[in-house]
Amino acid sequence: MIISHAHRHLLHHLVCCCFIVFSSLSWAGALDEPVAHPAIPVLDESGAHVLNSGQPYSPKTTCGTGGCHDYEQITHSFHFETGRDEARDDFGALRQLPQLVSPGYFGGYNCMGGSNPDNLAKKNNAQVSDFADHGSAGLIKRCISCHSGGGWMEKDRNNRRYDEVNPDTVNPLDGDYFNRGTDENNQSADSSVVSQWNWQKSGVVENDCFLCHFKFDDLKVFDDQVSADTSGYDHFRSVRGTDLAKKGFFRYVDSAILEVMNLNHPDGVTSDKSLLNFSRTDGHLNLDDNGNPLLNWNPDAFDENGKVVIPMLRYPNNDNCMMCHRTSNSRRGFYGFGEDTAMEADAEGIIEEDYQDDVHYGKVWTETNGESRAIENCNSCHSGTYFKPSYSNVDLDSPHQFLKGNSDMDVRNDLDFNPAPKSCEYCHETSPNRAIPSGHDTMLDAHRERWKASSDLQGYTAGSLDRITQTHLDVISCQACHITNKKSRGRPLQILYRYRRGEDNKLKIIPYNPRLRYYWKDKTSGYVMNQTERNRAFRLETDADGNKYGALINPVSGEQLGTVGARMSHGSWRFSDPADYNSFKALKQAYDSVLAEKGLANPDAVMVWTESNYYIMSHNTRLAVDSLQCEQCHERKQNGSFSALVSEQGVLGKENIKQVTTLPDKRLVDEGLVIFDKPYMQVDDSGVVTENIADILYDSKINPSMSILNAEQARVMTGSMHKYALDNAANQAQLGAYSSRLGEQIFTPQAYVFKGDYGDDALRHLALLLEANSATDAIFSTAQIQASLASNEQFNRAQNAGFGGLISSVINLQAAYDNGQNMSQLTTGGQMLLKLPYYSDITDESKIKLIHSDNGNDWNDLNAKLVFVQAQTDGETGFALFLTEHFGYFSVASQNASAQPVAVDTDSSTETTSSGGGGGGSVFLLPILLLLGWRFRGRLSVSK
């Protein structure tokens, strides 16, 4: 069937603009079953019909043109970006981890690779030796199995589609356009080779909608050359990864699943058919004259108008989610929320124990709008539209920002609880339709009465029981008690406990599993070695018996220094850690040579043991009888009652020990060759490194961060601006007494808000607001905002600029367009409201100045209008609200204030977890930190 271009365009436009209603099925009963999507043409990148061109299909042109789905908005969500939109070359340096360029898998801590993960190259690299393990193309080849495309697989760090950039305009060694380990023809080469990647040849990986919106149970192998024992799921994943992505056929990747998608559906194609098959000979893909895979599109799958009806899921099934999130099997003991999660009973009604079970599976939740859904997949908690009314239209432009809380990834932290996913507290306590299985009015009543019935509260007075019960609910998360018996693919998984900040901004103890890792760095400069540099110290050898081992060598001289074990893992050889003290010393010597060759002065390579992520456990909730019992945390007293103190032998005590690693010799720690990044790690005389829960709880009460980025105490935070109705904007910005007056400065019904929601306390008191209109929509709907505390030197320059003492922190506020270019000031006209933390009781406007600097060194008085000032009190930091059109460095000064910066330890080798210095920092944690012996910088002494 050959379709003319004019007819093709008209048909596509009509299909995508039609009013889509799936009225033939009961909404609540069939919400998770495939429905026949209205017939559509399948188009290639150029917009041509695939039956005419024979080219791979393009999700962007097929689904995202003609007025249908907002492809650009959808693929900008954090699941697709995974850090690309937060990437900066200085991202890691600002967080004492210079090897990182973003918080996510794109440039952050790679999810794989153990203690020798591969790193993404920075955008700008001066020489080949600066180029890390992969460019963006190499990362696609590495990570294709768990990423659907779009986002970082489609666009560079300047928001340009890779294959639309003229390769002649690319800067040498640009991390988006060069790659390590491939040549100029995109063919594999030695890891020492760094060449420009040919994006025009490979194409990009657009987002594959069907990875989430096609039911995997309906996949079927149609090609007779494929083994009958191969499932459709395994086949398409193998083609997608091994045959296409890893060979650089990026634009073909999204067509892999089309080969096994069975179109059979009562409301569409009524026989088994697929859209295409890849041409093969003896199981290998056939290539055309240009070296690209040959596709055989199936004309019988299309109707007489060249359109096809595809059965699609409105919401992803459990299997779709777990294709990527199956790594949670080992990280969290989580296996999804499918049928295996259902609790099953034997003939006598006794529940059979299964570590994959969750007590919630199969229950029905009724939302406040009256809509009810069975809790049988991830959407019940993580979709923002799953409970929308049954009469609602299909949301063609749903932004696909899945609801998340304070996770252990630190990607898009500005979306934490914004809005919040379903939580224990919401469903069981705060919702008007709260579910309390025991029938009590509150969860406090339910727990108190259960504990009374179990004699757990004996020995305490009646008047104290509510207080005792509420204390537990305030301090311990529901998950901490109700998630037990976790297993990692059948093996017991030790549960640890730490503090985490929740939706109510309060700290509670949660269960988690730490991602224990080490890295090697130069202690002198702080430089962290990448995988390519570390692997230079090893050479794969074969002994007389044919066994592989690693020769430990000096990479500069070639001298062999020792041997280590070697094993094949995930397609590459991995080398073991040295087995004895001398071999460790030899490895350090080799790494010192690598660092010296890079030009680093006085290199001092050290191994740093750390925890990159604290994998929170939020699933597999157990019945009350299988939850933690009182005796697992508390000892019984002589009279039989439970002690109020936490037992040292209990799960929250110092006897609950996690083994981190075993070193061959304690001298490695004593001599500083091995160092610990976490204060609760300790080593015994035999070299066993451990940590215990009591120490972890003490440390995480001060620093409840969920990853190595230490977001809770970071000196820098990033995020996007969010649009709210005006009254909600005031609440989001926490404008206090000024909230009702926001309309005096912002005259539109909605406003954009950037609010500091993590990091140093000073950053949490920062906010930026501006009108939402067509001009600001065009820029600030996709702009990236970064706020950071100034350095000590910049703080002192502001302090000594002649405007008086500082009565605010010194904060650097930057805004960047979606192409990464920084803004120096508003280009949309008008002004923005800037809220800064305020450490004074001075309220006389004539005595308060907003001072500004473009670079942190040269300061001036902006003569900005002071809109409002809320003085600091003994219990709360104040704020000052100004109008300005500038970005840059800001602080507030007054001739009536004085400040005396406090001395600070400036040893660059010291790992600090508090960012309270420089920039004035915050005063909130000062009493605690002083008790701990920590010193703060730039503290303020203020007088009227």
Image (cartoon, rainbow, N blue to C red):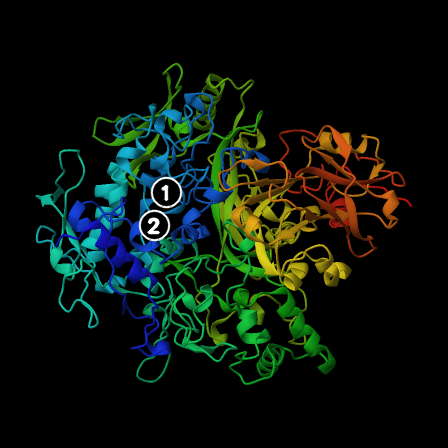
Residues at circles 2 and 1 in contact by the CB criterion of under 8 Å? yes
> Which residue carries the number 2 mark?
207
**Location of residue 102 in the rendering, given as x and y in whole percent from the top left corner:** 49, 40
| Front position in the image: 887 or 457 | 887
Q: Amino acid at mark 1?
A: Glu
Query: Which numbered disc, 2 or 1, marks the residue that appears first in the sequence?
Result: 1
10 Å crowding of disc 2: few (<14), some (14-19), many (20+)? many
Label disc, if present, on residue 154 of the rendered structure: 1
Residue extending farthest to the top is: 557
Image point (40%, 27%), residue name: 170
Q: Amino acid at mark 2?
A: Asn
Residue 474, by quadrant, is bottom right
Secondary-structure class at tag 1? loop
Tell me: 541 left or right of 706: left
Image point (28%, 65%), residue name: 37
Residue 131, by quadrant, is top left
**Location of residue 270 in the rendering, given as x and y in whole percent from the top left corner:** 15, 69
